[in-house]
Image: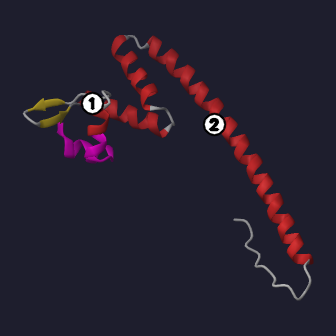
């Protein structure tokens, strides 16, 4: 059992972050008066939430996973849904990767064309610096 300050420190988040996820209904710490008490269950849920956010899932998707966890003691449906969402995320990231690679190629081509043009510019023109690619 941890207070909000200790829970936040352990998870590497702010107390505001913990209150945010509580407001969204993803965690429900116990209350002793006005003090929030975080059990191992709530810490585990927060770790799942943070992992889900790091992997690019929305709060709504994370909430669906957590709700399935509570409803399905065998976790079969949760794992099935997880696989569907994970595969969709993989597909989305692969599309983004292809788009980024295409954009980089276009930018590199433009940069090379600009450098070639500067190299061929009349000597009296101001020569641009070569701010080569990283």
**Label 1's element?**
helix
Crowding at label 1, few (<14), some or many (≥20) Cα neighbours within 10 Å?
many
Does residue 118 appear to the left or right of 68 in the view shown?
right
Q: Mark 1 against mark 2, which lies toward the viewer? A: 2
Residue drawn at (51%, 17%), measured in percent from left and top? 81
Could you tell me which secondary element the residue under label 2 belongs to?
helix
Identified at 33% across, 47% down, the residue is: 12
CB-based contact (under 8 Å), mark 1 and mark 2: no
Q: Looking at the image, tell me whether mark 1 or mark 2 is earlier in sequence order.
A: 1
In three-dimensional space, the C-alpha distance between marks 1 and 2, rounded to whole angstroms, equals 30 Å
As drawn, the label of residue 93 is 2
What's the residue at 76%, 79% (across, down)? 129
**Residue 130 placed where, x, y %?**
77, 75
Which image quadrant is residue 35 in? top left
Q: Position of residue 66 (x, y in %)?
A: 38, 22
Q: Look at the image and say whether residue 112 sits in the magenta stretch.
A: no
Q: Which one is nearer the viewer's eye here, 53 or 7? A: 53
Labelled disc at residue 42 = 1
Q: Position of residue 36 (x, y in %)?
A: 16, 36
Question: Which quadrant would the C terminus be assigned to in this image?
Answer: bottom right
- Considering only vertical position in the picture, is 66 above or below 43? above
Q: Which residues are magenta?
A: 1-18
């Amino acid at each position: 059992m941890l207070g909000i300050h200790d829970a936040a420190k352990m998870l590497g988040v702010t107390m505001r972050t913990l209150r945010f996820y509580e407001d969204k209904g993803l965690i429900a710490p116990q209350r002793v008066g006005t003090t929030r008490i975080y059990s191992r269950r709530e810490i585990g849920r927060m770790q799942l939430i943070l992992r889900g956010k790091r992997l690019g899932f929305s709060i709504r998707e994370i909430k669906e996973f957590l709700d399935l966890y509570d409803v399905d003691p065998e976790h079969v449906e949760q794992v099935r849904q997880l696989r569907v969402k994970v595969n969709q995320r993989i597909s989305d990231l692969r599309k983004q990767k292809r788009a980024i690679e295409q954009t980089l190629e276009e930018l590199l081509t433009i940069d090379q064309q600009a450098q070639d043009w500067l190299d061929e510019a009349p000597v009296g023109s101001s020569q641009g610096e070569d701010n080569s690619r990283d």
